[in-house]
Amino acid sequence: MPQHTFILNGQQVTVDVEDDVRLLWVLRDVLGVTGPKYGCGLGVCQACTSHINGKAFNPCSVPVGDLQPTDRVTTIEGLPATVGRDLHPMQEAWLQFDVPQCGYCQPGQIMAAVAKVLQARAAGRQLGDTDYDEIRNICRCGTYYRIREAIAAAENQF
Amino acid sequence: MVTQSPQQPFRPEGEGFGRRRFLGFVLAASTLTVAAQLGEGAAAPKAAAAVPGLPEPAELYDLNDMLTDATLLTANLITITMNPDGTASFALPRAEVGQGVTTSTAMLIAEELDLPLDKVRVTLADARPELVFNQLTGGSNTTISTYTPVRVAAATAKQRLLEAAAAELGAPLSALSALQGVITAPDGRSLGYAELAVKAASLTNLRVAVTLKAASAFQVIGTPQNRIDALDAVTGRKQFAMDVKVAGAMPAMICRPPTINGTVVSVQNLAAVQAMPGITDVAVVSTGVAVRGRTFGQCIDAVRALQVTWGPGSEDHATDATVLAELRAAENPLVTPPLPLLTEAIDARFTFHFASNSPLETNCAVADVRSDSAEIWASVKAPITAQEEIAAKLGLPVTAVTVHCVQGGGSFGRKLFHDAALEAAEVSQKMGKPVRLMWHRTDDFRHGRVHPMSTSRVRATYSLGQVLTMDQRHTSVATEFGHGLGEIITSLAAKLPVGGLAFSETIFTLTQQTPYNFGVTSQLLTEVDNGFHTGSMRNIYSPNVRCAQELVVDRLAAAMGRDPYEFRREFLKDRRAVAVLDKVAQVGNWGRAMAPGTAQGIAIHPEYHGFVAVLAEIDCTAATVNRQIPDAVTGPRVTKVVCAVDVGLAVNPKGLEAQMMGGIMDGIAITLTSSLHLHNGVFQEGSWDNYFYTRQWNTPTELDIIVMPPTTGTPGGAGELAVAGAMAAVACAYGRATGTMPTTFPINHDAPLAFTPLPTVPPIPQSPTDGLSRAY
């Protein structure tokens, strides 16, 4: 069985699994990292959103064989360490506005929000309505408004 | 977003001392363990909501009534344990699916126990068959039914702790004070609950009278609190069914038929699929062909590889049009006698299409079935019914089946049923191995529960400034109630003033109402029984029934030359309804000048001892409607919503605001964008880019939710309340912005499909491989 090596939340990991198994299942079923959630497996709902080399992506849509040993994968579990804190400021804002309801989509929402802020910052601007409208993550509990409030509060905190 | 009215003093019913005396129990245990009885009143959520004369929980638990009960029951008790580490534990016999009941329950305990909120641990109880009807989560009933018993148990614990402290400190009980988990004597000596937990324990079961706090003394109830599980949620630590680690429980999925209820005739390549990478087992089960493997990804591969000959389904020739024709043929006629002189009528007919109650967490369950026992982990709102049905399916005694209730990733009605738990049990038994069974998203839309299609006819007559009649005939594909609510109704049949009706008619009669003084009113339900898997969807009938009514109210106002707000205000029956209506009109600046193509809409909805009013502003201009967002339905955008809610007493105003916000997003979705399209026995939608639930680009950019100060002093239901009000307000706004009253919901249902339907064979699509190229 092929071996795959990559960096997961700051630590190198090696897994024995077929090349075409999508990273989401390697994380959840093989490595037991359950922060990224399954909501469709189609790259649509974005519940599994994590970061690869600092950019948001959907592990459900990436065969594990596509990863390089130097690729840095960050799930919600590893997000605080990227800023050297116990909680990322985006997570703190999520708590401040009490965003989660069932909580199922929230790891993906937070990972998407962090990437969206960094994307806008790289382009030299603050987030606007158009940026929020580009966040495709489903929240079936309908927490969208508090998500906007939390992102706006955290935008300049990291 | 949120403004909150200042908490004002109030004098609710039941505030008097006598109405606050209840009976609690101290149970024999090594550490302080207290209990209170869950009651009959709690078992009849719908009845309690609508039928005068049925006892309210507070009355059922009145001390005098209870003292006449000679038997100390230990079966139907809810139990709080005071732990030697100073925390209190409680296993809530209800489901937490995002609605916030673990938090509000912890608040009730913190209040009566005088313990900091973060010292209260609330978990979900396993299925407890002895609770009979008292472990059903539905009808926005949790807080209504547990508000008193939970506080009684907590008050019992505090009383025992005070007694133990009095003995330890040698001080009279009346001189002690309890604050934040510490009991202090007049001389300043103090003991923490941690030190008293074991000393306060009892060797025998005791029955004691306790007095609940007066509302004026509340420190926790009525204050905005964050969810107790928020930290777990934002760190990814919160555990859902698929995150539970059960030894050997490998992923499992089902290959499902191409049409609803299709059956397996034969499988051509079972051995070949079983030999695929990672796959351990393949078995034919009652709903399709089950596969089990190392990863869900490999299960998806196996499902797609299976070559199955399928038998016909139950609705293979049905389409939206045939179901609608069937509903119209079944409509109960509206009979209005010849109209007197000067009397005019408004007649309207509305169509509400199939919709999906699918949460983001698809149907799923873990099952470990052995020869003589079974253990299930799932989020279920009717765990006792689940336990009974699983036992029957497996051929095991009910007592051999354990159902562990796991927190759910949303429900919206879906988790009243336990389809995945039943399936997982069957698969585990057939394969002889534990399984972690999960539905694919596409299956969840196509084969999962749906909210039934319905029509509503409304006729109102008016004359000389008065509305004389309003009649409504609601006709619906049957809603399934096989989750325990039916049994509750049977058990209470003798008490209900609507004997002889079917379950669904009973529920319709007990929940639906016309909140206006419109003379002679009538509302009737007719059902068409099809072979669809149906269920409620964040309410059963109200969003559709009340939306139809409120649209006709707007028509009446227009016909009578009245302003929609002033008209409603004049005819509303209840002053609490007027108060919330006034609040949104004032905060939302009702009647302000609006640009062409935009408008305000206003509506109210009463239910579950509560009232909600919603004012919505909508933008139907071409520039907005034609916004281009990839794989999305944009259309009219609700730009602003103001919502005022009075639930009698908001235990947690912050949680109540969250429920209103979610209900508003649901109301926007079912009015403007989200529905299922039925074609030849299969729903066309198979992904969240087909089923257009509210997304960020549909979300109002202004949202103002006002929690009204306490009115009745007892909590009403919250989880479903806002959906009907929001749907009606958005529909009314749309009608006023476009000049045409909408009659088909969602408004875009009859437009060409905004997506290309996924194939039905194989039943589920393969996951993409281009994720890296889409990283941002």
Image (spheres, coloured by chain):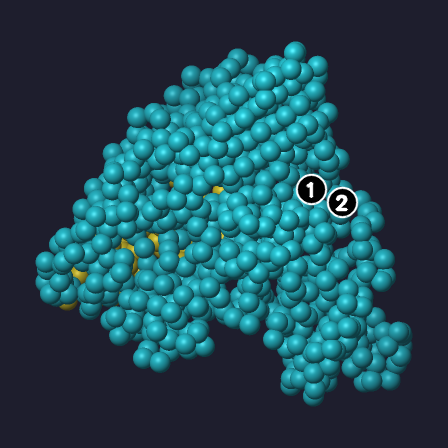
Chain colours: A yellow, B cyan
* Vertical arrangement, residue B174 with respect to residue A37, above or below: below
Query: Where is mark 1, residue-wise?
Result: B646
Residue at 42%, 34% (x, y): give it: B330
On the rendered image, what quadrant is the C terminus of chain B found in? Answer: top left
Between B423 and B653, the one nearer to me in the picture: B423
Report the number of discs: 2
User: Which residue in the rendered view is the most extreme toward the front?
Assistant: B338
> Where in the figure is residue B332, as x and y percent of width and height?
48, 33
Q: Contact, CB < 8 Å: mark 2 with mark 1?
A: yes
Between B554 and B476, the one nearer to me in the picture: B476
> Where in the figure is residue B230, as x and y percent of width and height?
54, 56
User: Which residue in the rendered view is the most extreme toward the bottom?
Assistant: B203
* Vertical arrangement, residue B607 with respect to residue A37, above or below: above
Residue at 80%, 55% (x, y): give it: B14
Query: Where is mark 2, residue-wise?
Result: B711
Mark 1 neighbour class, 10 Å CA radius: few under 14, some 14 to 19, many 20 or more = many
